[in-house]
Image (cartoon, rainbow, N blue to C red):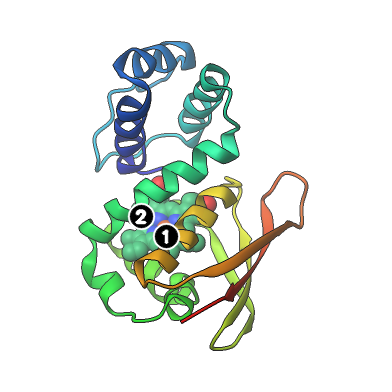
Amino acid sequence: MKGIVFTEFLELVEDKFGLAVVDKIIQQSNLPSQGAYTAIGTYDFSEMLGLLKHLSEHTKLSIDDLLLTYAEHFFSVLASSYPDLINKYNDPIEMLSSIENHIHVEVRKIYPDAELPTFEIQEKTATKLVMIYKSSRAMYSFGLGLMRKTFEHFDATAKITLEKLTSDGTEVKFSIVKTNE
Ligand code: HEM
């Protein structure tokens, strides 16, 4: 997992819960990196799981809720770091249906070792998108947060529902229906 995902995560934890909590979850997680992340480095995904687990225990918030909130923050990081990737779109359904064949393809050019999910489109109309998320990392709540922010970015609203196809969340069906204009 790319370092930027860790550095932004720890920054948000510091903002919301304070530096003492950052130190505490780093200590508790016994990290090979010892929590010294650089944005362009690459670190084991298990370090993120450790940090999330201990933050969840400390805050009593579920890992899904933490990932959802984190994704909403991460969207603004992506939007300011890669404006050209997002500005190419003027519609949230168009953008979300292009993650697999455009956005993450470009991400892989920038970070060849990025660990990205796959999205398989099952149904697409002007107002509806059904796609299957697949990833061994099971970060579907992170995907949900990014999807919500995508609609907000275009001043649009949507009803997004998800259905786990595997109990561990490595395959999840997203149904996204645009609700207004
Ligand atoms: C992960 C870039 C938009 C879904 C990532 C990562 C990067 C990235 C750098 C981390 C990879 C790693 O740590 O190795 C971008 C950029 C975007 C964008 C630049 C737009 C400009 C989106 C959107 C979604 C999405 C709109 C909505 C579904 C995900 C998910 C992951 C991820 C779920 C977590 C990894 C996993 O589940 O396996 N993306 N992304 N991305 N991205 Fe994107």
- Label 2 SS: helix
Q: Amino acid at mark 1?
A: Lys
Q: Residues within 10 Å of mark 1 (few under 14, many from 20)?
A: many
Instruction: Name the residue: 76% across, 52% down.
Output: 166
Residue 149 - label? 1
* Label 2 or label 1, whichever comes before in sequence order: 2
Residue 160 - label? none
Q: Nearer the viewer, residue 112 or 138?
A: 138
Q: Position of residue 23 (x, y in %)?
A: 35, 14
Beta carbon at label 1 within 8 Å of ligand 1 = yes
Instruction: Say whether marks 2 and 1 touch (CB < 8 Å).
Output: yes
Beta carbon at label 2 within 8 Å of ligand 1 = yes
* 26 lies left or right of 81: right
Is residue 49 something one can see in this rendering?
Answer: yes
* 116 lies left or right of 174: left
- Quadrant of the displayed image that contains ligand 1: bottom left
Q: Amino acid at mark 2?
A: Phe
The answer to whether 154 is drawn above or below residue 62 in the figure is: below
Residue at image mark 2: 75
Q: Nearer the viewer, residue 83 or 39?
A: 83
Residue 162, picture quadrant: bottom right
Is residue 113 something one can see in this rendering?
Answer: no
The answer to whether 86 is drawn above or below residue 168 in the figure is: below
Q: Position of residue 32 (x, y in %)?
A: 40, 20
Q: Position of residue 97 (x, y in %)?
A: 50, 76
Mark 2–mark 1 Cα distance, whole angstroms, equals: 7 Å
Q: Nearer the viewer, residue 144 or 34?
A: 144
Instruction: Name the residue: 25% across, 40% down.
Output: 39
